[in-house]
């Protein structure tokens, strides 16, 4: 099986596990995100879709599909970058109390780390004590990945 059809198969499996009705647009878009190590904007996704599946897709459709998959916790939006990533935590079936995203500011590679509910509550309390209310369910950290870091010191 090629890498491409492999990710399509994974996408279908996850949709079934999450009770997401399978449509080719949803499966194809999700498989592109799964195959990408980087966060992608809706327009980048539309371009890749056209390239990989040889069919054009309007950005508005991409947004609609992404919104739907976000509701199912299969896709996350990185607010600071305004880009999207496939959830990397869906195998453990956790309920997603919170996620931390490590985002390389050089190559835009993204890694999602789960965060325990207790830890997240603690953070919220600290913020409340400072007179603020946390307005997000996810933390986005500006990072440099190891690969880019090595490249920089050479
Ligand atoms: Zn996730
Ligand atoms: Zn990097």
Image (cartoon, grey):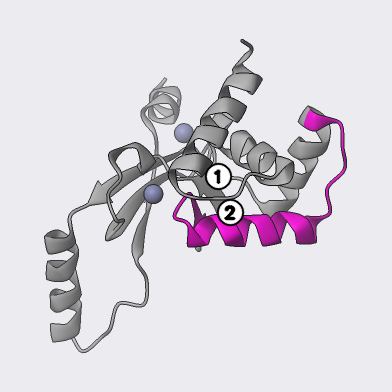
Q: Which mark is residue 141?
A: none
Which residue is more in the foreground, 46 or 92?
Answer: 92
Q: Quadrant of residue 33?
A: top right
Residue 86 is one of the magenta-drawn residues: no
* Residue 78 seen from this side: no
Query: Furthest residue to the top?
Result: 1
Q: Is residue 83 left or right of residue 93?
A: right
Which residue is more in the foreground, 110 or 35?
Answer: 35
Stretch of the chain drawn in magenta: 53-78
Which residue is more in the foreground, 105 or 133?
Answer: 133
Which residue position is annotated with label 1?
39
CA distance for labels 1 and 2: 5 Å
In this rendering, is residue 139 above or below 41?
below
Q: Residues within 10 Å of mark 1 (few under 14, many from 20)?
A: many
Q: Quadrant of residue 59?
A: bottom right
Q: Which mark is residue 83?
A: 2
Do the CB atoms of the residues marked 1 and 2 lie less than 8 Å apart? yes
Picture coordinates of residue 43, whole percent (x, y): 74, 51
Q: Residues within 10 Å of mark 2 (few under 14, many from 20)?
A: some
């Amino acid at each position: 099986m090629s890498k491409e059809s492999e990710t399509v198969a994974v996408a279908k499996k996850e949709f079934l596990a999450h009770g997401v009705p399978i449509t080719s647009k949803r499966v194809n878009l999700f498989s592109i995100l799964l195959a990408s190590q980087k966060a992608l904007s809706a327009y980048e996704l539309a371009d890749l879709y056209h390239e990989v599946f040889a069919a054009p897709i309007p950005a508005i459709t991409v947004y609609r599909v992404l919104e739907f998959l976000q509701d199912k916790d299969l896709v996350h939006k990185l607010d600071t970058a305004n880009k999207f990533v496939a959830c990397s935590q869906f195998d453990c079936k956790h309920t997603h109390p919170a996620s931390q995203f490590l985002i390389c500011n050089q190559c835009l590679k993204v890694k999602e780390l789960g965060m325990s509910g207790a830890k997240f509550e603690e953070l919220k309390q600290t913020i409340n004590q400072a007179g603020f209310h946390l307005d997000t369910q996810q933390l986005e950290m500006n990072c440099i990945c190891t690969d880019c870091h090595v490249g920089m010191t050479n």
